[in-house]
Amino acid sequence: MNKIYFIMNKIIAAFSGLHIPGVLILCFVLLIISLRGIGGNPTMDQLRTKTYREDGPFELSPERGRFALTYSLVEDKSVFFSIPVARFATPDLGFWNGNYVSLFAPGVSLLVSPGYVIGKMLGNSQVGTFAVISLFAILNVFLIIRLSLRIGASKPAGILAGLLFLFATPAYAYAVNLYQHHISTCIILLGIWLLLKQTVISWKSHFGIWFLCALSVLVDYPNFFFMAPIAIQAATSFIFSKKIRMHTAYYFKAGRLITLIGVIIPASIFLIFNTISYGSPTRLSGTVPYVAQLDEFGQPVKSREGQDVTLEDLKTAGTQSAVTFFNPRFAVNGLYIHLFSPDRGVVMYTPIMIVALFGLIAAYRRNTAGYQLMTSVILIIILLYSMWGDPWGGWAFGSRYLIPAFALLSIFLAYILTMWGKYLFFLIAVFTISLYSIWVNTLGAITTSAIPPQVQVLELEKISGVEQKYTYMRNYDYILGNRSKSYVYNTFLSHTFSAYHFFMLLFTSIALLATVSFVSVYRSNRKMP
Amino acid sequence: MNIRTDIRLPIPSRIKRYKIPVQQFVRKHEPCALAIVLSIVSVCFFILYLSNGLGLAYNDARSHLDIGRRVVEGLKPGLAQLGSVWLPLNHILMIPAIWNDWMWHSGFSGAIQSMVSFVVTAMLIHRLLQRLGVRLLGRLLGIVVFAANINILYLQSTAMTELLLLSTMMLGVYELILWHKDHTILRLVRSAFWIMTSTLVRYDGWFLLGYAACLVFLEVVRKHGYRKAEGMTILFVTLAAFGVFLWIMWNLLIFKDPLYFALGPFSAHSQQSQMEAAGALDTKHNWLLSSKVFLIALLYNHYTYPVILAGLGFILLMSDKRFTLSIKLAATSLLAPLIFNILALYLGFSVLFVQGYFGGTWFNVRYGIMLAPAVAFFCGYLVDRLVHVRWVIIGTLALVLFFAFVNQDAVTIDDARVGSSQKNVSEVSGYLHEHASHTKGFILISAASHDAIIFSSGLPMIRFIHEGTGKYWESATTSPDRWARWIVMRTYDDNDLTWKAVSESTGFAAYTRVAEYPFADVYELKSEYLPYVNTEPVYGKQK
């Protein structure tokens, strides 16, 4: 018994002193194990099969739409989709000027292209593409740790917060998949980090912030709003005051305006892409007409609303206004869906984030560095996506739109863990909630993101004739059916043990990592005077 | 590396030098400037809704205007035309302007009170925040939350009663809160007066009267004991309940029943009974559903986020040690409409449908706007209190309001246009306008059922024989062929008083149905009977 205690103590002591890169490597290994995919370099004909779509990594249209653009750019050297690529991208397919085009902002597809090329060279083009997102997820953990330290949290608490963000929120499911959320999160965290890392913002940071602001829109249009507080704070830092005798003089750092050239590269890509794809630099992808289905000749036959359309209808169709996608009328339902609903709610999927609210209150009292900036971004994310017409995010796992907000909340989680980490009762309560959150999200990561919204389930039950689940219990059934979408499991481990055992093994590993982190938070707080 | 290209701006330093005069200037002219800005906003939005035709979209708005018009014009003009269905203050205030045809048909005679009330309520929110020590930013935010709400801007542009109620209630509450602060008897009298006026606008005021009386009693009991509390409460209630007393007396005198307004055939109670029979009153005796439905209406009317902020502001105010328990209790009077509306739904006195949640359509969803002053006040207080995040709150509020304006998100307009409150009577009123404008003869119609048709026809009130025209109505329903060239009614509907009376008369056979529409049919007297029909008023002045 004494020996076990001694060994445990040694592990915890080693972890307490563990360098951040070590933790990041551990996280990356866990992500690679969970990464969704199928080996090989699939052709478009293969990608359209059930193996790759319903049963594989392209189960939902956002993944397909972005991968279709990457594929088209790399393989066909074109922003216009060939008919096979267009078929693969449906039902989220755009149509403009007689061409099939992407309905998504191009940033994600462009950023993951190197992953596709490298993956292809290694014989795993799809896995390579998805792995880029995992790299961004790791970068997010690193930034959470750095920002936690910046606002006054301890290192163990920062590490724990980073781990909980990655494995105890829906961020996990979207770190092994082709979605924009981790890239957007990374841009937001980087922007905040550039603002907070020094007291006086350097010209390099200013340059970086403008670059990130423009890049964020290239990745996902709503990022414009999320980056707005960062841009405003950066812009206000152009002006500084100095007390001269009896009055204050204000100065404007006109030279810093030069840093605005940071926007040129991403903005140029954005404008050129829009011009080529949609015929105008200011026309956004989501505003062009949708095509949900093509006939055997590659002609459009169905719109997104399920109505019959012809080529002529689409040619004469106008565009929609992007700002009308968000309406305060939807906020009542949106807030409920994001926060409390059984099919997507934070309470159900990642209750650990509720603990972060205590951190928000505690940080307010001390007015920690960047408090206003981070709370404004969190609030804008929650509000904007509550006003979004589809707060469920289609068929999805948890509230995927809130992933950047979860990252920022994790920083406040680190803060409260630092403040209250000496109270064993608090830590045990948080630990219990963490285990539940990790269990749920590990389940989501290695199975499926195709969870229907509750409102669609009744209709679905009518079609399928069987009871349909709309919570993570659908994922549980999936794993009990001995199915997983993990590339590592399906390629190397499926003959050795069942999907359920794989899940339990992965969950236990993450839980163990979290346990050790909790103990080190407790130990570090006990050491504090 | 720092680029040494700093340019010194001279202007801010000048601002600093003149800081004290600037502050004094702002302090001195702040209310005046705000009143001017609010008045301009008010007029602009009235013109907007007048020009796009939405100003009179509510069926009730047209009925309110007709009630006011009947007092000054018609076959039997006079104060008795104020009726019993709605409380009278709104219609009394219309009288000075309603005689003018443009003011009647544009709705301006009814909207002008709402417009003034809009400015007054916004100024009161500002003033109350100021009196409770809230700084400039919080005060301005309070005004913005109230005034930059399209639902408020729409209702202030119509002849509806909501804004008038909000202003009178706010005046009463304002004085009541300040009385809790300084205990000046004059404030209590003023509060009683304004609460009295609110009891003459809508029945929400009656609840406020009871709530305020309880607050007055509690406050004096706490401070001076029961004997003085009894006296003070009687003093307060004597004036504050005078409007209620007058209304009951009015009903007794005119309709021979003091509770005619509550239990009469056109009362809300009667309408709700019909709805209950049709199974559309699920909120009755269901606390949870009543609260949920009203809460959703409240959130819809205020774009959700400000309500959340106001809730937070309320909690902070209740825990603010700077304020005494008296002031905290008095501040709860701002929430009286919340309790009233839930209670009214629970007791079955009111009905409210929110499309997508309850009822399948919109109906009375505008009731959620009753808490607009409370939401604005608590938001203003919150911004003042949470110093570190005030710009976060302002920025996020700006975002929500931006999308509200971009999408023209106004649940009250939907309520008026597509809900049960709307009544597109343009076809039937168009028919009347086309055929009766240049032809002599009276039109027999029930005002209780078809006020909107009377209004929209554009014909003078004197052309209509309705329930309020005394002998004309009695004669016309007995022998319609002698009095009415046209009859407008819902065929086979006994709720339509015209049909109920005329269908049994022998003269009805002299009519031909010339037009059929969703809300009413038009009957015209056959040509052989035309020489015998009266086309001029003959009864002179009736009592």
Image (cartoon, grey):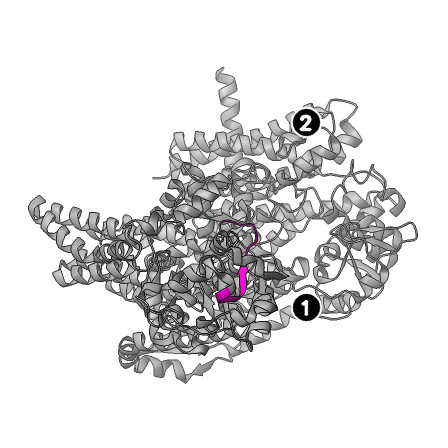
Left or right position of B52 against A277: left
> What chain is tagged by disc 1?
A
Residue appearing at x 52%, y 24% in the figure: A8
Query: What residue does disc 1 label?
Result: A267
Residue appearing at x 68%, y 27% in the figure: A477
- Range covered by the magenta-colored residues: B482-494
Looking at numbered disc 2 in the image, what kind of residue is underneath it?
A: Asp
Q: Earlier in the sequence, mark 1 or mark 2?
A: 1
Q: Crowdedness of circle 2 by 10 Å Cα count: few (<14), some, many (20+)?
A: few
Q: Are marks 1 and 2 in contact (CB under 8 Å)?
A: no
Q: Quadrant of residue A484?
A: top right
Residue B491 belongs to magenta span: yes
Image vertical order of residue A495 relative to residue B249, above or below? above
Left or right position of B68 against B243: right
Residue appearing at x 32%, y 50% in the figure: B260
Query: Which disc number belongs to residue A477?
Result: 2
